[in-house]
Amino acid sequence: MKKSMWIVPVLSCVFSVFLFTASCSKQTVKADLQDVKDAAKKESASAASAAAASSSAPASVVQKAPESVGSSAEDLAAKAKAAALKSVVNEDVFFDYDSAVLSAAAQDVLKNKSVILGKYSGVSVTIEGHCDERGTNEYNLALGERRAESAKSFLVSLGVNPSRLKTISYGEEKPVNSGNDEAAWSKNRRAHFVTE
């Protein structure tokens, strides 16, 4: 029995030493971690101060010019002009059967065109008068001319210089839709715009 009694104090001492060692190692790890963090902070602070000092001092290093990220102002202006002129070309003015009178919708389209033409004063436009296939060739050529002139007169009344506007009639010669019904004919009764 006496032999087993000495085991308890020895185990107590070993256990105490073990706990003491474990707690010391935790403190050492925490201290090491804190040292690493402090070193990183000092390093970033010194790098920032060095950058500030180098920016205030004359640079001895030649810096490369920044590369163009996007388009230049001229490229953007050219793209805007192309888009605006495309809208002038792509939107036709339509007329009722056997008529050269501008509807309210046609006048709105022409107002939009006059704004764009006012912005780009160097652009000239040819207004093409078109008709559907009904009627004689001679009659449709004359009607196409009246339609083109009607659109031109309205644009001139909105301030577009008449020297920038030309008219031509194609009558029924260039249909946009070759069908033989009212839906096709209504698309062919138009004034079409071509920029120069």
Image (cartoon, rainbow, N blue to C red):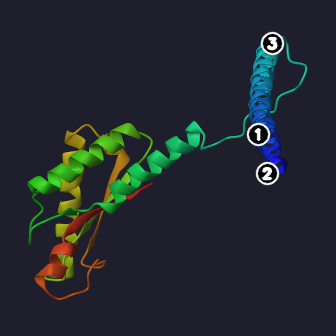
- Closer to the eye: label 1 or 2: 2
Amino acid marked by disc 2: Met
Q: Position of residue 2 (x, y in %)?
A: 82, 47
Question: Quick check: 149 above or below 176?
Answer: above
The residues bearing labels 2 and 3 have C-alpha atoms spaced at a distance of: 79 Å
Mark seen at residue 12: 1
Q: Position of residue 4 (x, y in %)?
A: 80, 50
Cβ atoms at labels 2 and 3 below 8 Å apart: no
Which residue position is annotated with label 3?
A: 53
Which residue position is annotated with label 2?
A: 1
In the image: residue 162, left or right of residue 94: right
Amino acid marked by disc 1: Ser
- Element on which disc 1 rests: helix
Cβ atoms at labels 3 and 1 below 8 Å apart: no
The residues bearing labels 1 and 2 have C-alpha atoms spaced at a distance of: 18 Å
Q: Quadrant of the C terminus?
A: bottom left
Cβ atoms at labels 1 and 2 below 8 Å apart: no
Of labels 3 and 1, earlier in sequence is 1
Question: Quick check: 95 above or below 159?
Answer: below
Question: Quick check: 87 above or below 37?
Answer: below
In the image: residue 99, left or right of residue 179: left
In the image: residue 120, left or right of residue 28: left
Q: Residue at x 29, y 48 (%)?
A: 113
Amino acid marked by disc 3: Ala
Q: In which quarter of the view is residue 187 placed?
A: bottom left
The residues bearing labels 3 and 1 have C-alpha atoms spaced at a distance of: 61 Å
- Element on which disc 3 rests: helix
